[in-house]
Amino acid sequence: MANFAEDKGLAYLWTKIRGSYVAKERGKGLSTNDYTTAERDKLRGVASGAQVNRIETVRLNGRVLPVYGKAVDVNVPTGEGSDMEAMSNKEIEEIIKRSV
């Protein structure tokens, strides 16, 4: 069994102690608050449960879509009449007549 009184054992123990040692800074104690006023004010302004990502605007073919919270509902038409922007009013009216 190793004896910690040996040089090798003492060197090992001293390395462990120095690795966990935190030097005291002049003017600071254990309960020193290192936040600046600006940092505290910024944190106070963050809502509980807030997340970083926020959707500001969503556009579909240049048209602004409504954003509800973090959700955007993009309704993509399928089937006949799905490309209504490229159709004339007459073509759209014919599709509506056939559907009714």
Image (spheres, grey):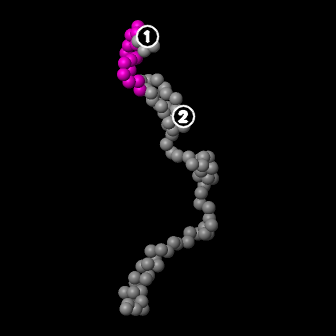
Residue at 43% from the left image edge and 78% from the top image edge: 16
Between marks 1 and 2 in the image, the one whose residue lies nearer the viewer: 1
SS for dot 2: loop
Region of the chain picked out in magenta, as a range: 76-95
**Depth check, front residue: 69 or 3:** 69
The mark nearer the N terminus, 1 or 2, is: 2
Query: 60 or 30, which lies in front?
Result: 60
Whole-angstrom CA distance, mark 1 to mark 2, is 34 Å
Give the vertical position of 2 relative to 25 (above or below). below
Which residue sits at x=60%, y=46%?
47
Rendered-image quadrant of the C terminus: top left
Q: Residues within 10 Å of mark 2 (few under 14, many from 20)?
A: few
Q: Quadrant of the N terminus?
A: bottom left
For label 1, the residue is 97
Residue to which mark 2 is pinned: 68
Residue 80 x, y percent position in the rendering = 37, 18
Residue found at x 44% / y 27%: 75
